[in-house]
Amino acid sequence: MLLNYIKYELLSSAEGSALPATYNETGPRNATTRASPPPPPAPLHRPAQPRQPQLAALLSVLTSPLTSSRPLPHALSRAFPSPSDAFPLRTLPRLLPLLPSPVLSLRFLLWRLTHSSPLPSPHALSSLASSLPDLRSSVPLLLSSSAEPLPLRHYVLLLNISAHAGLFPTSLAVLRHMRSFGLVPDGACFHHALRAAGSSGDVSAVLEIMSGSGASPTVPLIVTAVHKLASAGDFESARRMIDKMLEFGCVPNVVVYTALLDGICGLGDVDAAFGLVEEMEGGKLGASCAPNVVTYTCLLKCLCGKGELGEALSVLDRMAARGVLPNRVFMRTLVEGICSEQRVADAYAVVERLVGDGNLSSEQCYNVLLVCLWRVGMALEAEGLAQRMMKKGVQLTPLASSSMVGELCSRKRLLDACYWLGVIEDKGVLCDSYVYVDLLLGLCEEGHVLEASALGRKVVERGIRIEASCADRLVELLKQYGDEELASHILGLRRCPDEVWL
């Protein structure tokens, strides 16, 4: 998505020692080798449990009769003076589907988010949007039942949530509801509506409302509109939009042309993409439109997706000739594309070039390469690289560590996974929680009792929550091995599918 591309930052470079390009070393241990017995178990400390739900109190408020003097927001605020404490954001995706109706779920969410400053992250809003039942119908019902205009913040929230849900008709209904009361949507409202657009007709509908309200497009709005138009294949309208920027008091720049390029690349039109990049490089569009690292990353992603690795590798030379430095996103895109074609030697050559030039650190580059090797199933090369990184003092990141241990688990190389987990933890790096749970279950199922006991205690000490079905299986196996104490503690970490922690 372009909206992610234009946020890429040029990362600071740091020199690091390059690793040898050999990549045919074997892993640390054979999968049939048993790990060393763990030290005597330490006393287990069970983590504190979260408080019980306040769902009954909330349902009582939502189902109580309301009056004009006691509207729902006032009733909720009176019952729950501190909304963020009563209903933490992390609990809302499980809570919303349990409320009496889709409209009440939406009303409750608007009340809860009104007290959130700043707004939740895009990831959190996306999760909330997907958890709202029947959002397509509940928003129009909410609007039609409102005899007065909603607070502006509510309109912005509805548009933001609709954009995350990809519901353009809902976004359009919100804009029209605002205009019916004579309200002029601000730039944020139009921007959210454009994000939900799925066709050039949708873009035109938003721009028509904007023109009717007397608002002029800003550069961010134009960038989003151009990207949407180009992604829909309407390159002519996208170029006309750029040509009109001066009329709106805006100056075309590299961001808007990169938006156009990304739309072209999304449709896989390599020739048109190269044509636009050459136009940007030629200087006729102006110095402010010269391609930057984000521009070249869009082109690179398109080339890798088409399997044109020769052209993809040439992009690095093209950038060097223009003095454009690669960043971590560019490097990851290129290395992933090369590894997907099993061209490991080329991947090492690119990484060593970037590290040698001092553009990116060895830690950044080699961790990306390590993750890519695991993802394409090149376990032998990946383990050899991990060994050399350890010897050279190149720290493994949590992502690379989790990828490696997780892949070893999926290959049933459980004792090797235990070995690497120990090595990684000795370096002060913790893997993601799911890695510990998956490995623990695998050890139990394969009968590696000592290793399972040691790892199980780590899981309990860290308070890692475990899905119900997995926890039940672990408890069953641990009881078979006679470890009733650990089974009891694992049971305490069991997370029910329908639990709502408030």
Image (cartoon, rainbow, N blue to C red):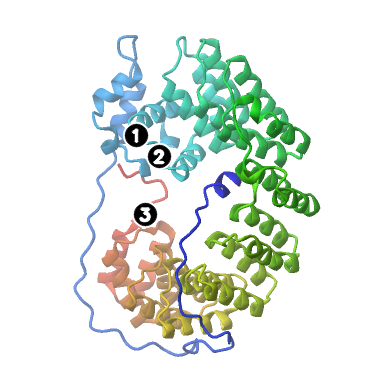
Q: Which residue is mark 3?
A: 495
Left or right for 262, reference 48: right
Residue 56 in which image quadrant: top left
Q: Is residue 1 above or below residue 81?
A: below
**Element type where label 1 sits in the image:** loop
Q: Residues within 10 Å of mark 2 (few under 14, many from 20)?
A: few
Choose mark 3 or mark 2, whichever is in front.
2
Q: Earlier in the sequence, mark 1 or mark 3?
A: 1
- Residue 208 location in percent, x, y? 66, 20
Q: Amino acid at mark 2?
A: Pro
What's the mark number on residue 116?
A: 1
Q: Residue furthest right?
A: 271
Q: Label 3 sits on what residue type?
A: Arg
Q: Report the amino acid beneath label 1.
A: Ser
**Position of residue 397 measured from the top left corner of the image (x, y, whole percent):** 43, 69
| Mark 2 in CB contact with mark 1 (< 8 angstroms) | yes
**First-in-chain label (3 vs 2):** 2
Q: Quadrant of the C terminus?
A: top left
Residue identifier under label 2: 120
Q: CA distance from mark 2 to mark 1?
A: 7 Å
Quote the CA–CA distance across marks 3 and 2. Answer: 24 Å
51 w.r.t. 149: above or below? below
Viewer-proximal residue among 15 and 478: 15
In this rendering, does residue 251 appear at all?
yes
Pointer 1: residues within 10 angstroms few (<14), some, or many (20+)? few
Please give left or right for residue 404 compared with residue 205 in the image.
left
* Element under disc 2: loop
